[in-house]
Amino acid sequence: MHNRRLYAFVWKELLQISRDPSSILIAFVLPVLLLFIFGYGISLDSKELKIGVVCASQDSASNDFISALKGGRYFSVTESSSLDLLEDQMVEGRLHGILVLREDFSRKIAQGESPQIQLIANGSNPQIGKFVEQYVQGTLQRWVLLRQEKKQANVVPSVEIEPRFWYNNTTNRRYFLIPGSIAIILTIVGTLLTALVIAREWERGTMEALFASPISRIEILLGKVIPYYLLGIVSFTICLAFAVLVFGVPFRGSLWVAYLVTSLFLLGALGLGLTISAASKNQFLASQAAINAAFLPSFMLSGFIFEIKSMPHWIQMLTYVFPARYYVRSLQTLFLTGDIWSILIPQMVALSIIAVLFMAAINRKLKRSLD
Amino acid sequence: MFARLLPLIRKEFLSLIKDPKGRMVLIMPPILQLCIFAFSSTLEVKNNSITIYDEDCSPASVEISHRIAAASAFSTVNYVHDLSDLESDIEEGNSLLAVHFPSDFSKKLSYGGSPKIQVIVDGRRSNSGQIAYGYVSKIINQYRLELAQEKGVEIIMPTLVTRFWFNPNLIYLWYNIPGLLVLLTTVVTMIVTALSIARERELGTFDQLLVSPYTQWEILMGKSIPAFIVAMLEGLLIFSVGVGLYGVPFEGSMLTLLPCLSLYLISLVGVGLFISSLCRTQQQAILGAFCFMNPTILLSGFASPLENMPHWLQGLNQINPLMHFFAISKGIFLCDMSFPMAWPHVWPLIAISIFTIFSANWIFGHKVG
């Protein structure tokens, strides 16, 4: 290994990156754009559901229930006398659900029978459909309890449920989404960008030219890994700064652990990127392979948005292969909880194994290419 | 004119599929997505662990614990006997949720006091946590009502009969297939159109094409049609596997879906041409396409509901073709959306196509001249 030679080689790569507007776009502009989208555009829970209410008679009990719906923080209520009208609105996607209170609603309650309330919920988005049902059920339950307490105090045993959302006491969705989105961003920088750039070198034959030079294989490998590693670290720093300073996500772990985990993740991601480029030697193939093998899994299979525990068993097994899974877990812990070693160490071990495997793979791949 | 175009289109097809690796890249992604992503995208809350710390061990607290344990959201229950065990269960992420009954729970309950149940949720997974918390509070409230009824209090609880339209059992696959139709066709169309011109530019063969007898429009058509056909075939593949194999209902009509899908693909081809008109190298084209796809996929409404976005973003999102086509695709698959109903989402696609194709053509013309 020749230090000066390696230094010159790394410097040349860095210059090349800094002069290419598309690398800068991917490494610095896209991360910020994505953080803004995750910060402002994405929200999984529904804060305001639009429901229509058809109420056959304007009597005290049904009015009382409707005002309970309106008073809660979950619904924006449209009242209408025509079910058909509301149904049309639901087909057009403008309503999430329709409640139908029959005319015997109050009469039955007065007579001590339990009336039926019909809820037609829009199931075209299953998540929202579930929310509509759950929130209506909850409102109904609270309404019944409240009425009973008003009528005769102390007959319903009261229980105070005290919810505590640890690490995120205001259930701020940004706290949950932003740490995970950093994993996606670093996958883009580490795998996609690297695969693409090195594939271009193969395509143009400059990679072979490098092999013909006195630079050793390890030096070539390091010369390609170090600049993109640095780029990834800078990208991570930008994300971290934006997450904490702009979006106010707390960072409760230690910085050195965050950088250590990020380094391990980046080594694996870079290794994958280099392996893809060496296997495809073509930018079109490399980009498609990187999107399908790294980017989409980091989005879909990392537990960042979609809970791994809810997936079918065999897909849960599959998620262990992708480094993003371990990285998302580590970031969520580091940001919101702190240095919890019992979580972090297994993740770091897994990330290291993946990094070593990919580095070994690319090392072999380069050796064979020389033949 | 079409006869003149044919050789150009044939050549584009050949360059797409002549390489076995290239064929793989067109065939593997749809298969992968249909096998994995169709099933992995779910926001259901199930198979979670819950920790219960019952200091009281009274019939009431045991009964509530049993009911919580029986809920489908929780598959494992850890009973702990120490507050620190409960804390470490949450801290280490072993449990999504922990329920703590204080030692005076049943005493207070029977003397009409107001006992507290503490429910601790792992805020790192606040989304699932909130849903799971909803289940727990529902169970506890139900128990309260039953206790009152046991004491002879007459409680009238209206029964809620819920029917889910369009997806009666809330199956995520039904939602994912119309979404994958959008995702997959987008990735293929964008990469193929953006790249085919950039590649020729990088290799210098684009100039040769420009001096050939083909007009600029013909060249652009020759580049667009193969991408359109490949994306259309992949779209039909998703459709047939989704409907034929996975049994996702298709309520609407092919006569609505096909024109809408075609218009959508044309708008994407337009965006792809527009990007490649700005790029000099393949790398720029791919990264440009990627910078387009990333935000538009995220804001398409597939990953998260659109209504929750701030208004300015909803306004901006009107130029997102993925958002429009996802609304159409979901509408046709599940809600039997007709063409007139889809029109509010169709005309933006037409507008996007016209804008992007004409600007791409203009930029090409001016770059050479």
Image (cartoon, rainbow, N blue to C red):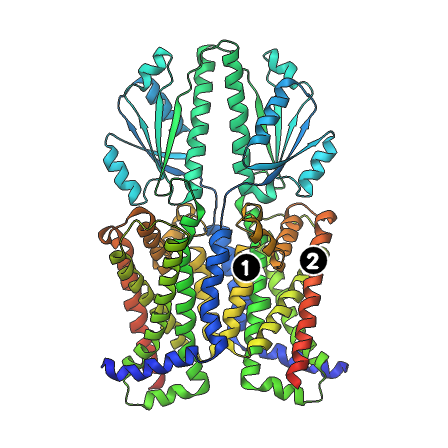
* Horizontal and vertical percent position of residue B308: 42, 45
* Horizontal and vertical percent position of residue A314: 57, 52
Side of A81 where B231 appears, left or right: right
Residue drawn at point x = 66 percent, y = 48 percent: A333
Label 2: chain? A
- The 10 Å Cα crowd at callout 1, few under 14, some 14 to 19, many 20 or more, is many
User: Looking at the picture, does residue B96 appear above or below residue B16?
Assistant: above
Tag 1 secondary structure: helix
The Cα atoms of the two marked residues, 2 and 1, are separated by 17 Å
Question: Which numbered disc covers residue A350?
Answer: 2
User: Looking at the picture, does residue A260 appear above or below residue B197?
Assistant: above
Residue drawn at point x = 33 percent, y = 80 percent: B9
Residue drawn at point x = 56 percent, y = 67 percent: A27
Give the quadrant of the N terminus of chain B. Answer: bottom left
Q: Quadrant of residue A159?
A: top right
* Horizontal and vertical percent position of residue B353: 30, 67
Give the quadrant of the C terminus of chain B. Answer: bottom left
**Viewer-side residue, B137 vs B123:** B137
User: Looking at the picture, does residue A350 appear above or below residue B76?
Assistant: below
* Horizontal and vertical percent position of residue B30: 45, 63
Going by the numbered disc 2, the residue's amino acid type is: Ala
Side of B251 where A365 appears, left or right: right
Tag 2 secondary structure: helix
Residue A303 visible, this angle: no
Label 1: chain? A
Q: Quadrant of residue B242?
A: bottom left
Residue drawn at point x = 58 percent, y = 41 percent: B47
Task: Look at mark 1 in the image and give the residue it sits on.
Answer: A297
